Amino acid sequence: LLAEDGSVAPSIFAEMSALALRTNAINLGQGFPDEDGPALVLEAARRAISDGVNQYPPGRGQPVLLDAISRHQQRFYGLTVDPGSEVLVTAGATEALAATILALIEPGDEVVTFEPFYDAYGGLIGLGGGIHRTVPLRAPDFQPDLDALRAAVTDRTRLIIVNDPHNPTGAVFPLATLELIVELAHRYDAIIVTDEVYEHLTFGAPHIPIATLPGAWERTVTISSGGKTFSLTGWKVGWLSAPAAIVTAILAVKQFLTYVNAAPFQPAIAVGLDLPDAYFAGIAADMQRKRDVLATGLQASGFDISMPQGSYFIVADATPLGFTDGAELCRRLPELAGVVAVPIAAFCSPAHRAEYAALVRFAYCKKVKLLEQASTQLEALS
Ligand code: PMP
Ligand code: GLN
């Protein structure tokens, strides 16, 4: 986790955001929106602070938020989740992932993820002493080969980590892939950990939580976060739901990670989760429009793109522009076009980086005007 000189190596997101600030470039690197979430939610946090919701809340989370998470799972997915025993509030999805992985693996256990993978998975599997196995997702559609998935899961597998919709590729897994994951988890007695932070940002078929499949709930930890759904990434309110015995094991770790989470933001996120259906449909439609603006711009600039079905991100192949090294392109992009992006290699294990070398990720969770400006600037590349 340390750089060669012994300092803490910044994550690719921090590095690229710093590059954007330094060069005054448009930051399409780190995935955070440039508009804050719903006024009602912001107001609820201010009210909570004024009302004195400022001391340690319960470790599992404030009951008002636990109840709202349970209602959300029922309303959108028909999942009945007991708020008192089957839900846990965490410091973002990141702490949910950390506590889950650290609670459920022993050193030497294998953990399967898809690749490219969100960077925290690799770091956390390493912290837990696990062995990371990956199943490749390849352009153009970034769907896994099902035989490769079958080959990766064995009786050494403790966890299968799913990320649907997927960061960085924007892929959404079809039902058949989710069904195979459940079947393999049963066959090899593995637990499924599913990171669904982009659950409300899909652009075609509705999101299918893997926990809703027959036989899945009893061995699945479902993780989400208020960051993406309410455009409040800095609040770091996340949560997970799972059977009570699994939540208890995760709570045992969580109590020594953060103990409890930011009190006044919890009732505010509860207000967000209870917003009418139109809010959730609206954010998906809005994000789809942004995706379309940036996709058109990237194509006009000469990139080959893979059209994302969900998330904040689009993957572009720079080969047609004469760049085979995406990391180098990302370093030079501020000077060439005044834009910052992230190389897909940053989401890969060292052994597989070369296969993804020419790909870069652009975030479109930005105002349409900014995406249009970035598109115009990127035309300088062609
Ligand atoms: N998982 C994925 C797939 C993400 O893209 C992110 C980052 N936004 C996270 C987890 C972390 O979420 P949070 O900020 O809620 O910790
Ligand atoms: N999830 C966001 C991204 O992928 C931000 C991640 C981060 O800053 N750690 O860009």
Image (cartoon, rainbow, N blue to C red):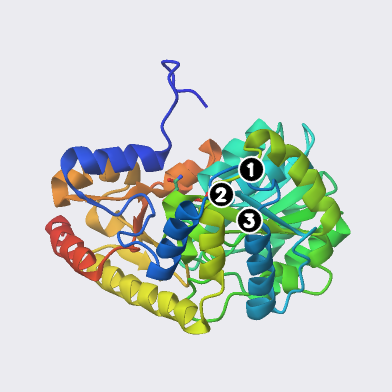
Q: Return the residue nearer the eye: 376 or 210.
A: 210
Residue that badge 1 annotates: 260
Label 3: state its secondary structure: strand
Nearest to N terminus: mark 2 or mark 3: 3
Q: Return the residue nearer the eye: 149 or 169.
A: 169
Give residue 299's position: percent from left, percent from top: 26, 69
Q: Which mark is residue 239?
A: 3
The quarter holding residue 270 reads: bottom right
* Residue that appears at 27% across and 73% down: 293
- Estimate how packed mark 1 is, as few (under 14), some (14 to 19) or many (20 or more) residues with alpha carbons within 10 Å: some
Q: Are marks 1 and 3 in contact (CB under 8 Å)?
A: no
Label 1: state its secondary structure: loop
Q: Residue furthest top?
A: 5
Give me the C-alpha separation between circle 1 and circle 2: 8 Å
Residue 370 against residue 342 in the figure, above or below: below
Residue that badge 2 annotates: 263
Give me the C-alpha separation between circle 2 and circle 3: 14 Å
The quarter holding residue 77 reads: bottom right
